[in-house]
Image (spheres, rainbow, N blue to C red):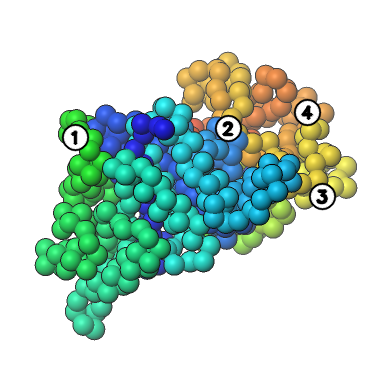
């Protein structure tokens, strides 16, 4: 059996308490004490992965290097830890059942009845132990999606019960609950926490640590009361007060000594105090920006900020790198037209056109790009945003009025974006896009080469359509430069414009690789260009 230690994180009372951030923050503290830590998320829904889900349902789909389409919490894990995750870090009920049912069809169960316990729970257990068994990690944090008491979470909680029993002191359970403030009573209330712990106890799991989400500080008396009702030590009742930024949470958890309590319970040495200098410097700059830029984020899912989570976070990292606050204006692409775009973009120092699927809002994205191209406003197009830049250039510079992607118009005479060869016969939607990290050669002398400071890069992909190389020569002659190319497949990965101060479109998703420690150079330099633009505008006004 593996030597790794296991921490299970469940949630109670309500969803959205921030299990992902608490898990990532604890992992950060343990990492900063010298342990090698990873986090995995088990989601109780039937989708095999979140790749087929609409962002309105589930927020952004986060893509790993190895091409897994995963829950957005994995993005937090990577941004906090600066260590890549993989397929093994996100498991769903759909995946578990698919594996078990495939085995049943192969006859692997030798005539036995296949049941939730032990077969489903054994498969959950096998996957919960996979990363630990790899020998790469000292500590594995396993976040259980959903809320304790949900029907669909039951097999996971049951597996945690079994594992806690089997692993003894090598495992512990953290339960995240809510301690609400009732304004009418003027009090914090512990009853929902007590009930939630009871629900967990009914399933046979005694939590070792309670992390209590709250708007107001918990008094010692209140902590004692929670401890008494829930069979935990007082020092294991951890306050998690609302924070201005998710990046504050590791330090708040440090103040509450969550890392120390965890290590003591796991019989692991505290080693040294957490090395958090870089993190603190980041926070200092985040809270004390010297400048501000306004960047428009043009997309069609803007009602739900989680749909563009990694882009949002990449801007926070890039803002810190430039010591400026990036104020994002979320602009709905369906609402943009050639007539109102000047008005909508008034005062913006840069515009990002977001990734997406389907034709809703496409014309608005194209109007947005025409405007920023003609008005020298810094532009970053991500995936569909890059494809729209190609369509816009085809229509308005090359004069092909019907230029389009075959995703939106399969009949166009100018399919400037078309489906990749390897995609044409694929019927299944799940997990069949071009996914994960691919190498890209950046062309020397381009703006993109300056941005990256190197010519060989790898970036993560999630798309089916591509630049149509049949039109490459026309585009080049008209001033659009292919600045990055996939060396194996000769696919255009980056485009930029010759006669524009900062106009870059990328077929991949740079936002997935931006972390606190390594802000992504494209976002950093894009924010820098926007900052310069804002100063230039000020100067112009001053003259
Ligand atoms: N819909 C486009 C494609 O499949 C772009 C995808 C995206 O923006 N991630 O190619």
- Identify whether 173 is placed above or below 290: below
Q: Position of residue 376 (x, y in %)?
A: 55, 39
* Cα gap from disc 2 to disc 3, whole angstroms: 31 Å
Q: From the viewer's perspective, is the residue at label 2 or at label 3 nearer?
A: 2
CB under 8 Å between discs 3 and 4: no
Q: Is residue 428 left or right of residue 286?
A: right
* Cα gap from disc 3 to disc 1, whole angstroms: 60 Å
- Identify whether 490 is placed above or below 290: above
* Cα gap from disc 3 to disc 4, whole angstroms: 18 Å
Foreground residue among 286 and 221: 221
Q: Position of residue 297 (x, y in %)?
A: 52, 50
Q: What mark, if any, has residue 469 been given in the picture?
A: 4
Q: Position of residue 442 (x, y in %)?
A: 59, 20
Foreground residue among 50 and 207: 207
Q: Is residue 388 visible from the viewing direction of this image?
A: no
Image quadrant in which you'd find residue 302: bottom right
Q: What mark, if any, has residue 66 been given in the picture?
A: 2
Q: Is residue 203 left or right of residue 499?
A: left
Please report the residue visible at 20 percent of the width from the left and 46 percent of the height from the top: 261
Q: Position of residue 441 (x, y in %)?
A: 61, 19
* Cα gap from disc 1 to disc 4, whole angstroms: 57 Å
* Mark 3, secondary structure of its residue: loop
Please report the residue visible at 27 percent of the width from the left and 29 percent of the height from the top: 34
Mark positioned earlier in the residue sequence (3 or 4): 3
Q: Please tell me how crowded label 2 is: few (under 14), some (14-19), or many (20+) other residues with Cα within 10 Å.
A: some
Q: From the viewer's perspective, is the residue at label 2 or at label 4 nearer?
A: 2
Q: Please tell me how crowded label 4 is: few (under 14), some (14-19), or many (20+) other residues with Cα within 10 Å.
A: some
Mark positioned earlier in the residue sequence (2 or 3): 2
The residue to which callout 3 is attached is 409
Q: Is residue 405 left or right of residue 384?
A: right
Image quadrant in which you'd find residue 266: top left
């Amino acid at each position: 059996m593996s030597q790794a230690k296991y921490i299970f994180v469940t949630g109670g009372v309500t969803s959205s308490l921030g299990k992902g951030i608490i898990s990532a923050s604890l992992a950060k503290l343990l990492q900063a004490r010298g342990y090698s830590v990873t986090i995995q998320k088990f989601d109780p829904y039937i989708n095999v992965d979140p790749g087929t889900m609409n962002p309105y349902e589930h927020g952004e789909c986060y893509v790993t290097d190895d091409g897994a389409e995963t829950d957005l919490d994995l993005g937090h894990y990577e941004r906090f830890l600066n260590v890549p995750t993989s397929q093994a870090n996100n498991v769903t009920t759909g995946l578990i059942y698919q594996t078990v049912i495939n085995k049943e069809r192969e006859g692997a169960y030798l005539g036995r009845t296949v049941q939730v316990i032990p077969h489903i729970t054994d498969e959950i257990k096998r996957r919960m132990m996979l990363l630990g068994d790899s020998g790469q990690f000292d500590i594995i944090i396993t976040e259980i999606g959903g809320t304790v008491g949900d029907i669909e979470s039951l097999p996971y909680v049951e597996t945690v019960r079994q594992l806690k029993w089997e692993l003894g002191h090598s495992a512990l359970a953290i339960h995240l609950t809510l301690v609400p403030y009732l304004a009418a009573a003027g009090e914090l209330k512990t009853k929902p926490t007590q009930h939630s712990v009871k629900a967990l106890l009914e399933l046979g799991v005694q939590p070792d640590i309670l992390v209590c989400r709250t708007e107001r500080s918990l008094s010692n008396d209140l902590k004692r009361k929670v401890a008494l009702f829930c069979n935990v030590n007082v020092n294991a009742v951890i306050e998690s007060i609302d924070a201005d930024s998710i990046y504050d949470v590791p330090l708040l958890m440090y103040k509450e000594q969550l890392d120390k309590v965890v290590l003591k319970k796991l019989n692991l040495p505290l080693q040294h105090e957490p090395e958090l200098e870089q993190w603190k410097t980041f926070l200092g700059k985040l809270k004390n920006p010297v400048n501000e830029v306004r960047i428009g984020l043009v997309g069609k899912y803007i009602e739900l900020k989680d749909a563009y989570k990694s882009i949002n976070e990449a801007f926070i990292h890039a803002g810190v790198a430039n010591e400026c606050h990036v104020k994002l204006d979320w602009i709905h692409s369906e609402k943009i037209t050639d007539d109102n775009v000047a008005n909508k973009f008034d005062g913006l120092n840069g515009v990002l056109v977001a990734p997406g699927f389907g034709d809703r809002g496409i014309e608005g994205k194209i109007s947005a790009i025409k405007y920023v191209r003609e008005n020298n406003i810094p532009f970053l197009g991500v995936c569909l945003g890059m494809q729209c830049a190609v369509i816009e250039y085809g229509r308005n510079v090359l004069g092909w009025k019907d230029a389009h992607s075959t995703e939106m118009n399969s009949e166009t005479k100018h399919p400037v974006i078309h489906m990749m060869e390897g995609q044409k016969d694929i019927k299944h939607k799940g997990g069949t896009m071009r996914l994960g990290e691919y190498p890209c050669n950046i062309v020397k002398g381009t703006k993109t080469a300056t941005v990256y400071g190197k010519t060989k890069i790898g970036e993560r992909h999630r798309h089916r359509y591509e630049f149509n190389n049949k039109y490459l020569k026309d585009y080049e002659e008209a001033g659009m430069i292919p600045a990055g190319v996939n060396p194996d497949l000769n696919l255009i990965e980056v485009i930029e414009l010759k006669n524009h101060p900062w106009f870059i479109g990328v077929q991949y998703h740079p936002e997935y690789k931006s972390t606190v420690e390594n802000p992504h150079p494209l976002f950093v330099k894009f924010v820098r260009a926007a900052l310069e633009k804002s100063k230039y505008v000020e100067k112009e006004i001053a003259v």
